[in-house]
Amino acid sequence: MKVNQLSVFLENKSGRLARVTKVLGENNINIRALSIADTTDFGILRIIVSQPKEAYNILRSEGFVVTETDVIAVCIPDKPGGLGQVLEVLEKQSVNIEYLYAFVGNTSTKNALVVFRVEDCDKAVEVLKSNGIQVVDEEKVYQL
C-alpha cells in the first residue's frame, strides 16, 4: 500500500524543472502526481511516476539529487468535507501528517486522490482501512 515518491532537489534556476521533465519523458516515464515546495535557493520536487525505480536511477545518472520516500495514496470523495472526514480519522488516532497534495484524476469517479506523507505509513493504512477509507494500491497509482 505504500507508494514510492521521488524527491528531487533543484536549484532555483530557470530550466531545472524542465530538465527533469524532459529526462523523464525521453525515458518514457510518465508523471502521475507532483508537488513543488520552494525556498529562495532550492526547490523540492515531489513526484510519483509510472516507473519509480527506473526514474530514480535515471535522474541520479543525470546528476540530480534524488531521494525516495514512502507515502500513501487515499481515494477521497470529491465533495465538500471529503478531505476533512479523512483528516479527522487520522487525527483521532494521533497520526501526524507531514505534508499532502491532491489531484482529481478521473472526474467520472467523483473522487480525488490525496497523497499523504505521515510519520508511520503502516499505522495510517491500518487506521484508514479500519474506517472504511480506500487506500489505493501502489500499482494503481503508478498506472493512473
Image (cartoon, rainbow, N blue to C red):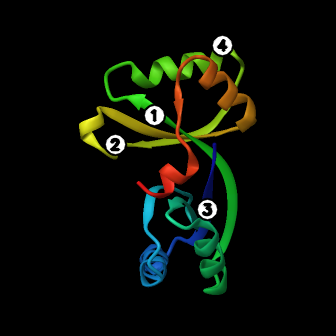
**Hey, what amino acid is under mark 4?**
Lys
Label whose residue precedes the other's in the sequence (1 or 3) = 3
Say which label, 2 or 4, has the lower sequence index: 4
From the image, tell me which residue sits under label 3. 6
> Of the residues tagged 1 and 2, which is closer to the observer?
1
Residue under numbered circle 4: 92
- Please give the name of the residue rendered at 66% of the width and 78% of the height, measured from the top-left corner: 57
Residues under labels 1 and 2: Cα distance?
10 Å
Image quadrant occupied by the C terminus: bottom left
Q: How many marks?
A: 4
Q: Amino acid at mark 3?
A: Leu
Q: Quadrant of residue 60?
A: bottom right
Q: Which residue is drawn at the image coordinates 66% and 22% (left, top)?
A: 127
Q: Position of residue 30 (x, y in %)?
A: 43, 68
Residue of label 1 = 75
- Relative to 99, residue 39 above or below: below
Q: CA distance from mark 3 to mark 4?
A: 29 Å
